[in-house]
Amino acid sequence: MNIKYKSMNNFFTTLTFLFITYFSVSQSYESKIDSIVAISYNQNEPGISILVAKEGASIYSKSFGKANLELNTPLQKSSVFQIGSITKQFTAVSILMLAEQGKLNIEDNIGKYIPEYVEIGKDITIHNLLNHTSGIKNRTPVGDKGFISKTNMSPTELIAYFKDEPLEFKPGERFKYSNAGYIILGRIIEIVSGQPYSDFIEQHIFDKIGMKNSSCGDTKQGIPNPTTGYIIEQNDFVKSDDMNLSLAYSAGAILSTTEDLLKWQNALLSNTLLKASSIKQAMTPTSLNSGKRVPYGYGFRFSKLGNSPVIAHTGSTKGFTSIALFLPKEKLYITALTNCNCKNVNNVAKQVAELFVSIPDDKITEAKHNQPERKSINVPSELLSDYTGTYEVKPNVNLTIGLDNTNQLYLLAPGQTKKVELFAETQNHFFVKIVDAEITFNKNEANNVISLTMNQSGRKIIAKKN
C-alpha cells in the first residue's frame, strides 16, 4: 500500500476555512462542514467521525475515510475509536460521584488510599490529582521508549512503575499535566468502590446513560464496528502497534463513538450523573496555592474561541486522536474521533466550531477598522495583469488570481465564489486585510511570473503558475 500524505493540507485547510468563514453566504452548515472536513480527510485514507450537536440534539453526524485500509472497510457513525485522554473526564466524574456518596473527600490526602504515597503523598490531595497540580511526574510505561506496548499491567504495577519518582514541585505550586496522577485516581476508585475501574465505569456510567457502544480497555471482546489505528512512516500509512489498553487505564483506556459521547455530554449537562454543584466544580478553572488560575478543572480544559468560552479535552493513543469540545454560550458540542495520529483533528473541530460562533456584522466591520494601519500602494495595471491566472496548490487544486474592472487584484479560493481583495505593499508583495495572509509573486530571469508564495499565520506554501 502506498498512500501518500500531503503535508500542506493543514495550511491550506486553515486558509480556505478563513475565506469560507468570512465570505461564504449561501452554503448550508452541512455543506460547510463537509468542505472543512473533506480537505483533510478523504475516503481512501484513515478517517474521521465527527458529530455536531446544538442544544443537545445532533445536527450533523458523518464519517469520512476507512476504518481498515487492508479490508477496505469504511468508517461509520457507529465506528468505535480509542478516545485516549478524554477518558480523564470519566475518571474525574467517577471520583465526584463517590464524593457525593460520602465515600471520599476530594481534600483527602492520597496516602489514605494508596500505601505507596503515605509519605511522599502526605501533602497531595485528590483535588491535586484531578487538576494536575500534584507534582507527580508524568512517567508511565506508555511514554517510555522501548517499552513493549502489548504488555498487560495491573493498576498496582502501573503505580509501582513511577512511585519512586521524586515530586517535580510542591503540591498546588504549579500545573503540569500528569497521566500518572490519573492512574492513581483510577486505583482510588477501585479501592473506595470495591470494583475494578472498568466495571465501575460500565455499571455507573455506560449502562446508566445508554452508552451501548462504549467499553473500558479490553474488557469486552468482539467490539462492534472496530477501527484500526494508523501512523505515518515514510509517507505511507502503517498500522500502529496494538497497544494493550491496561497501560492507559484510567488515564486513557476508554473506547467510544461520537454518538455515545453526545449521550455523555447530555448526561453531564442534565445532572443525570452528578449534582449541578459537582458539574460546576469540574467545569471551573482551579487555582494554584498562589491564587493564580489554571485553565483546567477536573478533566476539562478551558480556552476561548473569539469571545466564546470553550470547555474541552483532547486524546491520543497509538494511531488514534480525538477531541470533544463544548461552547456553553452557543450550546454547541462537537466531538471528532480519528484512526490516524497524522492530521490535526483539533484544527478541524475548531474550524467547525467557528461556523457557529456568532460575530455580529458591526463587530466584523469594527475589527477591520481596528487592524494595524498597513499602507498599500498603486501598481500599474499592466503589471497586475501579469499576476492573473491559476496557480496549482496541489494536484487538481488551484487558486485563481484575477483583476476586476476597478484595477483591483483579487484571489479566489477553490470552490468559492467571493473574491478576496489583495492590496499591494510593494510591486510584487500583497496582503489581505481581513485575515493574516500575504502573497508574493515570484519571477524568473526573463521577468515572467512563475509562482506565488503564500504565507498565512507563519505557514508557507509555493504554488506554481499554470
Image: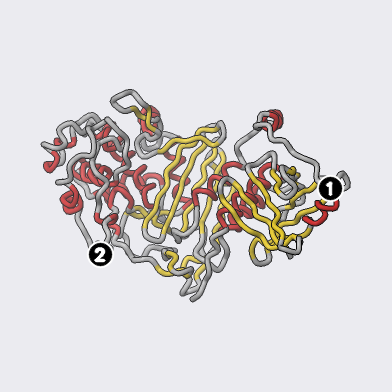
The disc labelled 1 sits on which kind of residue?
A: Pro
Dot label at residue 346: none
Q: Quadrant of residue 355?
A: top right
Q: Quadrant of residue 461?
A: bottom right
**Relative to 116, is 9 above or below?**
below
Marked residue nearer the N-terminal end (2 or 1)? 2
Separation of residues labelled 2 and 1 (CA atoms): 65 Å
Q: Name the residue nearer the viewer: 306 or 410.
A: 410
> What residue is rendered at 68% in x and 51% in y?
440
Q: Position of residue 147 (x, y in %)?
A: 25, 62
Q: Secondary structure at mark 2?
A: loop
Answer with left or right where residue 288 lies relative to residue 461. left
Answer with left or right where residue 318 lies relative to residue 393. left
Q: Name the residue nearer the viewer: 31 or 286.
A: 286
Which residue is denoted by mark 2 in the rendering? 148
The quarter of the rendered structure image containing the C terminus is bottom right
Q: Position of residue 304 (x, y in %)?
A: 51, 35
**Relative to 412, is 244 above or below?**
below
Coloring scheme used? secondary structure
Which residue is denoted by mark 1 in the rendering? 380
Residue that protrudes farthest toward the front in the picture? 445
Q: Position of residue 409 (x, y in %)?
A: 79, 48
Q: Position of residue 78 (x, y in %)?
A: 48, 58
The disc labelled 2 sits on which kind of residue?
A: Ile
Answer with left or right where residue 105 lies relative to residue 22. left
Q: Secondary structure at mark 1?
A: loop
Q: For the residue carrying disc 2, how many other residues have a C-alpha within 10 Å: few (<14), some (14-19), or many (20+)? A: few
Q: Can residue 166 be seen at all in this image of the molecule? A: yes
Q: Nearer the viewer, mark 2 or mark 1?
A: 1
Residue that protrudes farthest toward the top in the picture? 291
**Relative to 367, is 381 above or below?**
below
